[in-house]
């Protein structure tokens, strides 16, 4: 915590020691303006080898500049440009010395175009067709089919073992031995028994009532059917 307080104090001291920035709206040019003064000139004169001939000279004093340059033109004239530059702007004065001289130009003659020479087309060279190369037809190899004959399998039926069905024997029924009962003892009727009443009967004969006619007819039909069955 103490190190943080010390670091903050050092930053505050650095800001307080720094110079106050310039107020807004007042620009300070870091480069101090100095007067410019120079004077130079040069020239090139080599018509035999290089060809051109020109020269220039310029002089400046503070913000005013003046100069001149000369150029030899191909037509024999010399172009002279005198210029000046300052706070009022750039002013140039162009003039020429001498007279233009042009070499004699020959009259125009169109190029001659000779008539095209006729050249007959060469006769076509006959090239015989190459003899066809003999190529025997390919023989497709077809192996003879092999008939498949499976080996005969002898049929051997499985032996059948006869097992007779066991006879059903019902379980014996247990009968309990009969209980023996002793024969009742016979007691002779008492001799002094006499029935109290004697019963008798008499035969009464009564004539049967005559049957109705429908009953007689039914009985006759029944008897006829019975006789027919007996004859068969």
Image: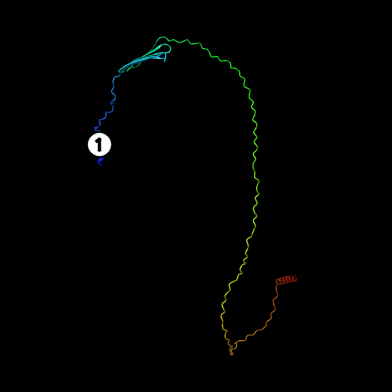
Viewer-closest of 54 and 137? 137
Circle 1: is it few (<14), some (14-19), or many (20+) Cα within 10 Å?
few
Residue 206 figure quarter: bottom right
Residue 126 figure quarter: top right
Count of numbered badges drawn on the protein: 1
Q: Secondary structure at mark 1?
A: helix
Q: 227 left or right of 66?
A: right
Residue at x 24% of width, y 39% of height: 6
Residue 105 in the image, given as x and y percentages of width and height: 48, 11
Residue 10 in sight from this viewpoint: yes
Viewer-closest of 84 and 161? 161
Viewer-closest of 121 and 141? 141
Residue 65 in sight from this viewpoint: no
Residue at x 25% of width, y 40% of height: 3
Q: 112 left or right of 227?
A: left
Residue 103 in the image, given as x and y percentages of width and height: 46, 10
Q: Quadrant of the C terminus?
A: bottom right
Q: Is residue 8 above or below residue 37?
A: below
Q: Residue furthest top?
A: 99
Residue 18 in the image, given as x and y percentages of width and height: 25, 31
Viewer-closest of 58 and 88? 58
Q: 229 left or right of 186?
A: right
Q: Residue furthest right?
A: 231
Residue at x 25% of width, y 36% of height: 10
Q: Is residue 149 above or below residue 45?
A: below
User: What's the image's color scheme?
Assistant: rainbow
Residue 207 figure quarter: bottom right
Residue 115 in the image, given as x and y percentages of width and height: 58, 15
Q: Is residue 192 above or below residue 68?
A: below
> Which residue is identified by label 1?
10
Q: Quadrant of the N terminus?
A: top left
């Amino acid at each position: 915590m103490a190190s943080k307080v010390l670091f903050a104090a050092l930053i505050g001291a650095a800001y307080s020691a720094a110079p106050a920035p310039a107020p807004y709206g007042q620009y300070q040019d870091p480069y101090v303006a100095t007067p410019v003064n120079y004077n130079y000139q040069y020239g090139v004169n080599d018509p035999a080898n290089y060809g051109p001939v020109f020269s220039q000279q310029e002089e400046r004093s503070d913000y005013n500049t003046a100069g001149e340059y000369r150029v030899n033109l191909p037509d024999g004239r010399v172009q002279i440009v005198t210029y000046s530059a300052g706070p009022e702007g750039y002013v140039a004065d162009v003039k020429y010395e001498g007279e233009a001289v042009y070499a004699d130009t020959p009259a125009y003659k169109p190029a001659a175009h000779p008539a095209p020479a006729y050249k007959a087309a060469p006769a076509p060279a006959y090239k015989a067709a190459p003899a066809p190369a003999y190529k025997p037809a390919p023989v497709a190899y077809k192996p003879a089919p092999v008939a498949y004959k499976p080996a005969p399998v002898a049929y051997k039926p499985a032996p059948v073992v006869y097992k007779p069905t066991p006879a059903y024997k019902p379980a014996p029924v247990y009968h309990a031995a009969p209980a023996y009962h002793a024969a009742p003892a016979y007691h002779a009727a008492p001799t002094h028994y006499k029935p109290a009443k004697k019963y008798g009967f008499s035969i009464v004969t009564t004539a049967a009532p005559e049957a109705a006619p429908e009953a007689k007819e039914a009985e006759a039909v029944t008897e006829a059917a019975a006789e027919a069955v007996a004859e068969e």
